[in-house]
Image (cartoon, rainbow, N blue to C red):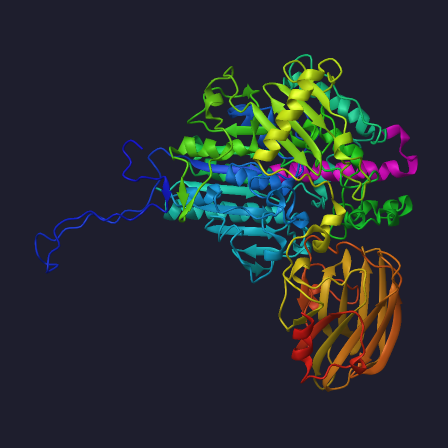
Amino acid sequence: MTGDRHARTMLPIPDRPAPGLTTYDAKDPDTAYPPIEPLLPPKGAPNVLIVLLDDVGFGASSAFGGPCHTPNAEKLAAGGLTFNRFHTTALCAPTRQALLTGRNHHSAGMGSITETATSAPGYSSLRPNTKAPLAMTLKLNGYSTAQFGKCHEVPVWQSSPMGPFDAWPSAGGGFETFYGFIGGENNQWEPALYEGTTPVEPPATPEEGYHLTEDLADRAIGWIRTQKALMPEKPFFVYFAPGATHAPHHVPPEWPEKYKGRFADGWDAQREKTFARQKELGIVPPGTELTSRHAAIPAWDDMPDELKPVLEREMEVYAGFLEHTDHHVGRVIDTIEDLGLLEDTLIYYIIGDNGASAEGTLNGAFNEMANFNGMAALETPDFMLSKMDEFGTPTSYNHYAVGWAWAMDTPFQWTKQVASHWGGTRNGTIVHWPAGITDKGGLRSQFTHVIDIAPTILEVAGLPEPTMVNGVQQSPMEGTSMLYAFENPDAAERHDLQYFEMFGNRGIYHRGWSAVTKHRTPWLLMEQTTPLDDDVWELYDGSTDYSQARDLAREDPERLRALQRLWLIEAVKYNVLPIDDRTGERLNPDLAGRPTLLRGDSQLLFSGMGRLSENSVVNIKNKSFSVTAELTVPAGGANGVVIAQGGRFGGWTLYLHEGRAVFVYNVLGIQEFATRGEEAVPEGTHQVRMEFAYDGGGLAKGGGVTLYYDGELAGTGRVEATQPMIFSADETTDVGYDSGTGVSSDYTPQTSRFTGKIGWVQIDLGVDDHDHFIDPDERMRIAMARQ
């Protein structure tokens, strides 16, 4: 680089001391060394802030004509550029990996979310070390780097407290500071948080007014202020990625109240209103058509009248959630402005990492985990009505109905997961950089993609794309810098070829045209799909049909065939093949073919172990299992949790209550089955054992429960149903306490700590007797043999 003393294509930049005179005595007048200077990027490199919201459709934000008020997005757009042909991958983790590497998601190993990873290179969830993340490149060039919020790029078998931490933000990810959560979603009221790689508890409770988005904004604001106070000469790279507005839709009650009655007309009418506003704002070009509703999505008028008040409330809560999120994004931006840094800070405000989420079923959900377990039928209309006032509160884990997701993707077809159509992949994006953008309030319609952000930032910072990072030769970035479009609204687009694929939904964009085929439906986890070769492809001319409303496949079959061939070529190039259209089945690592942290059918745990993700614990679903614990009970008895997995919205726990052993299985927060010991556990050291004998005959069945003290029968009971696929996306397994929301209504997390002593806890799959007692001298041998 001109005027730069560093050659920056090899990172870390090699230390190359200049040869010269070495004196014998430091007091010699000829003793001289150049001053030690901090590593800085080239002069003029700006600060960078990337804001990435979660699960926001193109037609949700008021900045893009939607019903959810986002004044800070509108303010940024008025002073910057609005990109109305910006694209994501149709799913969260793939979009995030693409953004942070500048490579296509299959190329970076993230063909789908980490929870459905397989052993295939494009779907393994393992980022190749030939594709170093942007944050690492910027850090090694002298930027201060920090991430706040969601990280969904850690392979599930590496998400335990023992790592390895190569894929965690503050280790291999290149962020010097990380405060947030690992995984796809989190409880906004009671999140499982990490500072770096260390689990931490939220600084306050929901009753004290805690909310995750506000906490993340507070942390980002504090970090930016500290960074500029201590290292004012260094630019920063801040990645602000709140869990909002992914389900659960949690928000303080005053925010949804602003929208009371606003959605009484339903989703069909809302699409018409949003589309009219989009045309008025010029967000969509003249001649754009509003796409029609697919038959799989019910009309508002066809929904049961008794359910409509619940459906309205779902959308009111979501709208308040998005406005609340924008408010806290605005606080971060206001801090940058207050520090006098806004002029020279490049801000990307990406409103959604994919289209709006249609994973909440046709009726919506009070607990979205019901659908992920194939048990949505438990949430009847009567049940939903009884819970309507709780939507958005700490007692809910709610999501809105498919129809609202479709409406939030106006004017496009389909939703999140559907990578074939723009409803899944086109997200409103705003770029603000006063020092580098003169066309304030301008609109840009060049085709752009999330992989374009990394090369844009490098070009703006005057940094070359590295060819070597940490001793590993790098593959080229696959995105195209967007900088050319900042000053020239009429510049010919440079990113003119892009494939799309997610769970078999696939498409290709080339020079204005798109060929697409929708293969799977997002809210049907076990859908019986047609063979891939039987999928029906559609053809759209983007130069005249912005919304993909007019299918030209019959009129131009030759062009369609050419684009289908081009999709296949790109798919081979970027590791898309073999296409994997499985969804629910891939949650099971045995079916998916990915590694697991635990092998065998036994696991030994010790007191104080906690924050163990579901993938860090032996899987007890749909089978018999036992839990044995060695407990020392003090005089006067003991109480508290021995072991708990999951939380208020689904899970199981073995604990002592009033001195008696209790096993509770909580099905989705809807049904709680408790088996209690008849007597208290006596003073002294004893074994408490729970055996669950699964009924068999399929998934989600019940079973008998038996409790033993030192091998002697202590109580019996029954669990009528179980969760077959997943307990929670964010709750964990804890020994000696219960973090998060708490599985049983007998205790709270604050009262859950065990008051005696726990020697060990062992989980075994299957039920064998050991005389219902494990010989302490044989315990380790038995456990090791079963792993």
* Picture coordinates of residue 606, whole percent (x, y): 64, 73
* Picture coordinates of residue 293, whole percent (x, y): 80, 25
- Horizontally, is 592 left or right of 145 in the view? right
Residue located 66% across and 64% down the image: 599
Q: How many marks?
A: 0
Nearest the viewer among 137 and 684 is: 137
Residue located 75% across and 56% down the image: 727
Q: Is residue 64 visible?
A: no
The magenta stretch is 300-326
Q: Is residue 173 visible?
A: yes
- Horizontally, is 2 left or right of 733 in the view? left
Q: Determine the main secondary structure of the stretch shown in magenta.
A: helix
Picture quadrant of residue 385: top right
* Picture coordinates of residue 668, whole percent (x, y): 80, 55
* Above or below: residue 738 compared with residue 456: below
Magenta segment includes 315? yes
* Above or below: residue 739 compared with residue 578: below
Picture quadrant of residue 257: top right
Give the quarter of the figure containing the C terminus: bottom right
Residue located 86% across and 28% down the image: 299
Magenta segment includes 295? no
